[in-house]
Image (cartoon, rainbow, N blue to C red):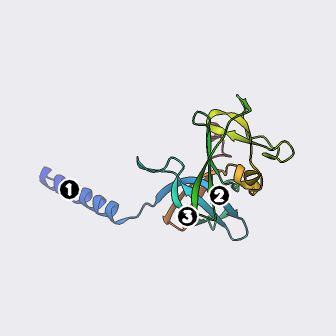
Amino acid sequence: MTTFKKWTIALVAALAALALAGCSDFGHVAQGRVIAYDAKAGQATVILESATAGQSPAGVLPPVIVKTPVDREEMGPAPAAGKLVKVDLKAKHAIVFDPGAQAFRTIDFTPVEVRRDVKKAPSAAPVDKKAKTITLYAAADRATVTFPATDELLAMPADTWKSGDVVRYYFKDPNQALRMMNVTKTDLNKAGE
């Protein structure tokens, strides 16, 4: 076979590979915090993480409803839901999702106690109506913060003060996850063992 024929075959093969790559849809990956989860309906309501500068660090609104994978083997542990989106100890505020307004709400606080080196969120209820305090877990700081709360804050639903799990999912149709991983409950250090 001549060198010209070899190069022609190689060029045709490369062009065919490029054409196939351009025609196929490899899908997309998204990640966000779960604010509601309905196991029976197989749906997670997620606030997607901001992908571009200038967007809110709390996430992108409106929340999206994503169907969990049809094949249960393509999903990790079921996500826990919660409306607490972010706790900023330096700025002394918490950001929660308000479902009635379909918006974020920033709640300023003055800490009465901050505990450091807390490895996971406490299992105790975050609201203490008797002491009129709320205790939040700041995962990024591995800390808890307790602050005095008004009657209005104490009356909010309990899931307002809990962080939902972060999930990462693969999709071709944005409303249907083909694979879903619970990032919060997956120990990536043990992956592949």
Q: Indicate the position of residue 50 as horizontal and vertical percent values.
A: 48, 50
Q: What residue type is labelled 1?
A: Leu
Q: Name the residue under label 1.
A: 11
Q: In which quarter of the image is the C terminus?
A: top right
Which numbered circle lies on residue 64? Answer: 3
Q: Mark 2 points at which residue?
A: 35
Q: What residue type is labelled 3?
A: Val
For the residue pair 51 and 85, the one nearer the viewer reads as: 85
Q: In this view, does 130 lie above or below 47?
A: above
Q: Residue at x 46, y 58 (%)?
A: 28
Q: In this view, does 63 lie to the left or right of 37?
A: left
Q: Indicate the position of residue 37 as horizontal and vertical percent values.
A: 68, 62
Disc 2 on helix, strand or loop? strand
Q: Residue at x 74, y 56 (%)?
A: 156
Question: Which class describes the residues within 10 Å of circle 1: few (<14), some (14-19), or many (20+)?
Answer: few
Q: Is residue 58 above or below residue 41?
A: above
Q: How many marks?
A: 3
The numbered mark, 2 or 3, whose residue comes first in the sequence reads 2
Q: In this view, does 135 lie to the left or right of 47?
A: right
Measured in 3D between alpha carbons, the distance from the residue under mark 2 to the one under mark 3, in whole angstroms, is 10 Å
Question: Which class describes the residues within 10 Å of circle 3: few (<14), some (14-19), or many (20+)?
Answer: some
Disc 3 on helix, strand or loop? strand
Q: Indicate the position of residue 40 as horizontal and vertical percent values.
A: 73, 69
Q: In this view, does 124 lie above or below 71?
A: above
Q: Which amino acid does label 2 sit on?
A: Ile
Measured in 3D between alpha carbons, the distance from the residue under mark 1 to the one under mark 2, in whole angstroms, is 51 Å
- Label 1–label 2 contact, CB within 8 A: no
